[in-house]
Amino acid sequence: MTQLAKYVKEMRKQFGLTQVDLSQKSGVGLRFVRELEQEKTTLRLDKVNQVLAMFGAEMTPAKITEV
């Protein structure tokens, strides 16, 4: 599971939210929340940040670390 998908799912559960609750409270569609948690590779960044804002977070640039 990607870090983003894992984070969203863990935070949603920590806040006691269902996927429906999260979609309604963040203003995105239920389908988007499901795709986010299922690691869809193409997601709109503005919508990702709408969801993350619920948990006081946002996507930011990060340096790629060499593996």
Image (tube, rainbow, N blue to C red):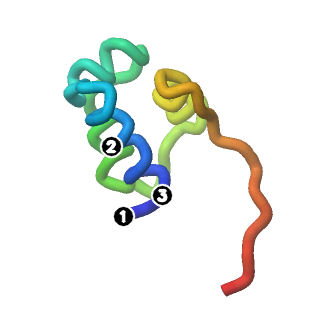
Q: Earlier in the sequence, mark 2 or mark 1?
A: 1
Give the left or right position of residue 16, taking residue 7 as reference. Answer: left
Question: Which quadrant of the figure contains the C terminus?
Answer: bottom right
Q: Quadrant of residue 39?
A: bottom left
Determine which residue is flagged by label 2. 9
Q: Please say if 34 is above or below 19.
A: below
Q: Point out residue 9 in the picture as x, y percentages from the top left corner.
A: 32, 43
- Residue at 75%, 56% (x, y): give it: 62
Residue, disc 3: 3
- Which residue type carries mark 3? Gln
Q: Are marks 2 and 1 in contact (CB under 8 Å)?
A: yes
Residue 18 sits in quarter: top left
Q: Which quadrant of the figure contains the N terminus?
A: bottom left
In this rendering, the answer to whether 32 lies above or below 21 is below
Residue at 49 percent across and 27 percent down: it is: 55
Q: CA distance from mark 1 to mark 3?
A: 7 Å
